[in-house]
Amino acid sequence: MLVTFLTFIGICSFASWVYENFRTPVLLLFRGLTQVSSNSFPEKYGPWAVITGGSDGIGKGYANYLARQGMKVLLIARNEAKLKKVSQEITEKYGVETKILVTDFSKGEQVYHGLETELSSLDIGILVNNVGVINEKPIRLEAMDQKLLWDLININVGAATLLCNILIPAMKRKRRGLIVNISSLSALAPTPYLAVYAATKAYMTSFSQALRQELLSYEVECQTVSPGYVETNMTEYLTQPNAPEKHFTQQLVKVKDFLHYAGYTIGKVDTTCGHWTHGIQTALLKILPDWLKLRVYTRLYTHLLHKFSN
Ligand SMILES: NC(=O)c1ccc[n+]([C@@H]2O[C@H](COP(=O)([O-])OP(=O)(O)OC[C@H]3O[C@@H](n4cnc5c(N)ncnc54)[C@H](OP(=O)(O)O)[C@@H]3O)[C@@H](O)[C@H]2O)c1
């Protein structure tokens, strides 16, 4: 009786792990082979794509990818000169219209009234909620500057939440649109000494998956993207000559390679890590039960906390 029960639990856990980790690659393969729609992104979703944090890193990668698909792009970030440079490059490369919005999401509630006014004049088909910040090294919560704590909340959580609230009504009315929410592999387990960042990413995953269900019947798509390490300003500290852990640098994926895969998943799957190597890392991590993952992360990040503070 006990053996039958344990076998049953084992089979259920294995089946659940297989479903969770093979659903996306199988769907990608199937939809890659069978999707015959000739609709371009602008026809399918609408002409404009809005990318938060679109002037650098992964956001800039999405802006280039979507412009190559014929989308007009609106980039939002703080640094006007950088925004102008990237938007000009995109127009020259892909011949699409571009716009920029200089906005600092760390300012919280006050920025959204102006943003809503600016965005209301555009027919927005795709929203990429990409903007995000991180504490550069593992740190105890009480040692963190309060400004950084508010930034993590306002930028990583506030921007995506409020922009969805602003843009979803028009998408639902038009019965088309796509929201891409950039979460992270960090969402997989609570992470001591990176507690707030990991929690903001767990929020993004939960928020995005719930929102997808809310939007299903309106034909508005919602995709959750949970990357591992990508080579951007955010991960630059890992590549410094004095970085304490060199093996992280071997895991870094270039933005171009990341978008090569992540871009292909658009319109095909609702959940992805973006890059296949991050998919393998995720599948391996998901073998561990939550309590063991927390123990592993606690050991790893306690070790990093000490290394980075030396
Ligand atoms: N890189 C990775 O390994 C990795 C892994 C998993 C998930 N992610 C997620 O991917 C997303 C993008 O990360 P990334 O590595 O591409 O970052 P990044 O290279 O640092 O780029 C961040 C972008 O956001 C803008 N930005 C930063 N603070 C802002 C603010 N307060 N208001 C408006 N815009 C702001 C930056 O431009 P300005 O400085 O001019 O404002 C820049 O365009 C984040 O959500 C991150 O959590 C990254």
Image (cartoon, helix red, strand yellow):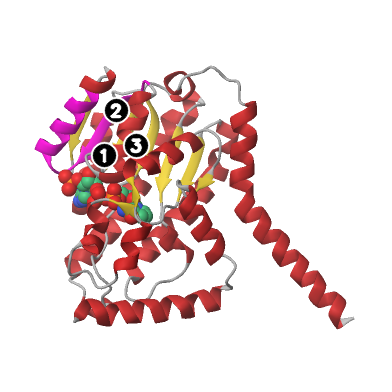
Q: Give coordinates of residue 34: x percent, y percent.
A: 65, 27
Q: Which residues are magenta?
A: 70-91
Q: Are marks 1 and 3 in contact (CB under 8 Å)?
A: yes
Q: Nearer the viewer, mark 2 or mark 3?
A: 3
Q: Which residue is mark 3?
A: 62
Q: Indicate whether 175 appears above or below 231.
A: above
Q: Is there any visible trace of residue 108 in the rendered image? A: no
Q: Which residue is mark 1?
A: 54
Q: Give coordinates of residue 180: x percent, y percent.
A: 42, 41
Instruction: Say the numbered circle drawn on residue 73.
Output: 2
Residue displayed at 19% across by 27% down: 89
Q: Are marks 2 and 3 in contact (CB under 8 Å)?
A: no
Report the quarter where the C terminus lies: bottom left
In the depicted view, which residue is nearer to us: 220 or 44? 44
N-terminal-most mark, 1 or 3: 1
Q: Is there any visible trace of residue 284 in the rendered image? A: yes
Amino acid type, label 3: Tyr
N-terminal-most mark, 2 or 3: 3
Number of labels in the image equals 3
Q: Indicate whether 227 appears above or below 286.
A: above
